[in-house]
Image (cartoon, helix red, strand yellow):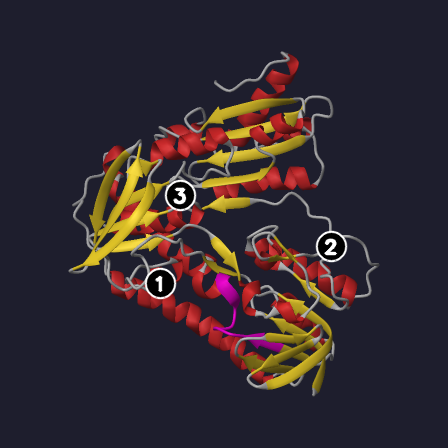
Amino acid sequence: MKKFDIITIGSGGGAKISSPAASMGLKVAVIEKDRLGGTCLNRGCIPSKMLIHPADVAVEIKEAHRFDIHNNPQFSVDFAKLVNRISQTVDSDSDKIQSSYKKHPNISLYQGCAKFVDNNIIEINNEQITADKIFIAVGTRPTIPDIPGLAGTPYMTSTEALRNTTLPPSMIIIGGGYIGCELGHAYGALGTKTTFLVRSKLLRAQDAEIAAEFQKVFSRYHDLRLGAIPTKVEYSHNTFTVHYTQDGKNLSVSAETLLIATGITSNADTLDLINTDIELQPGNFIKVNEYLETSVGGVFALGDCIGKYFFRHSVNFEGEYLFDYVFGGKTRSPIHYPPMPHAVFTHPQVAGVGATEEELKTKGIDYAVGLNPYKSSAMGMALLSDHGFCKILVDRKSRKILGGHIIGPEASDMVHMIIAYMNMNATLDDMLRTIYIHPALPEIVRNAARKAKTALEKNDQIRQP
């Protein structure tokens, strides 16, 4: 049996360990069942944003008349060329990773599905290998709901939607999370008529005020059917018909395409962990301790498959942490996550970090709110903003920033100001001592901070200008 110093299962976040370890001279086996680079590169963050940016440009073109700029609204999109360019770009990056691994003297690349046959023995392509340290970073895949009639139809998940080269006239999206909203925005802005079937509400994990604002604005561009529970799918003559119940009524909607975006499932079930002592948590996520160690010594897990955070930036952080304490000589200490930010690249854009207001209420924390709309700023006036705001949550006693949430243009960029302040354990006063460029969008964040200060002084919660 061939023995390595390290085995990494998964070439996405796992690369944060395998590549630097190989550069140190350690013998590394990398196992990947799909294209190298993981979900983010091949079927997630990168190709989706390469599709969403043109969609954002399309929205600007359609709404240019608001700025007294007139154009032909019947613009065309070479959708096949757009998607092929995206696919070629990410495939090229993936191929470069594969080439570099094959050339590296300390990396052995195994392409196939890893199966544990014992705690520290893995079978891959009919060969058994082992290592002193094993890192599991297998990620997740789209969940397929059990809807009668769905199986066997040519529905799409996010994976297919990012490789599809035909812009459909219409699309039904089942699901109201960030994946469905991002892809629905992309297809809708580029010309597809979109209908959302959502069991509860859109982006329900967001701060409630953010979710409400998002739903209000998003409904201008998409047909939203909330409280809709699919009961049956039919496919005939290149048309999907989804039957659903809503408010006690039996209804249906038809479209040329169907996108399933109802969540994700851990890929841990592909590893035959039943042959090991590795424990799982509810949802089939791998159980780890505060050191990202599984219940088997020498076996670690990170990323989506542990069910804590589902971002590339979070698995990057976990991978760097593991490398530092397992191989980098740093003192072993529990992983400490700084404030974990997120963004949803839709129209409108959403971003946040820290606690939501609902979480603070549940925990009984005494807080103040500062909320400032985009329109109450110089740049907001230039943008003719009719929606969007920044919301800052502050601890009343310590004046520390507990959370920040933004909805509107460039939210994913602006939230980094709040991320930085929270990471430095800064107070509201530190935010207010900062000089902000005038007239730039970050003044919206500053104005929200000013309103939080007023709320603290008046022992009140300011939400309106």
First reached walking from the N terminus: tag 2 or tag 1: 1
Residue in the image at 60% along x and 28% along y: 393
Looking at the rendering, which quadrant does residue 376 occupy? top left
Residues in magenta? 30-40
Label number found at residue 160 = 1
Say which amino acid is labelled 3. Gly
First reached walking from the N terminus: tag 2 or tag 3: 3
Residue 318 visible here = yes
Q: Secondary structure at mark 3?
A: loop
Q: Position of residue 356 (x, y in %)?
A: 57, 33
Tag 2 and tag 3, C-beta contact below 8 Å: no
Q: Is residue 119 magenta?
A: no
Query: Toward the viewer: 104 or 252?
Result: 252
**Quadrant location, the N terminus:** bottom right
How far, Cα to Cα, is label 2 from label 3? Answer: 32 Å
Is residue 464 depicted above or below 248 in this figure? Answer: above
Is residue 126 depicted above or below 142 in this figure? Answer: below
First reached walking from the N terminus: tag 1 or tag 3: 1
Q: Residue furthest right?
A: 331
Residue in the image at 44% along x and 28% along y: 378
Looking at the rendering, which quadrant does residue 353 occupy? top right
What residue does disc 3 label? 176
Q: Position of residue 269 (x, y in %)?
A: 55, 65
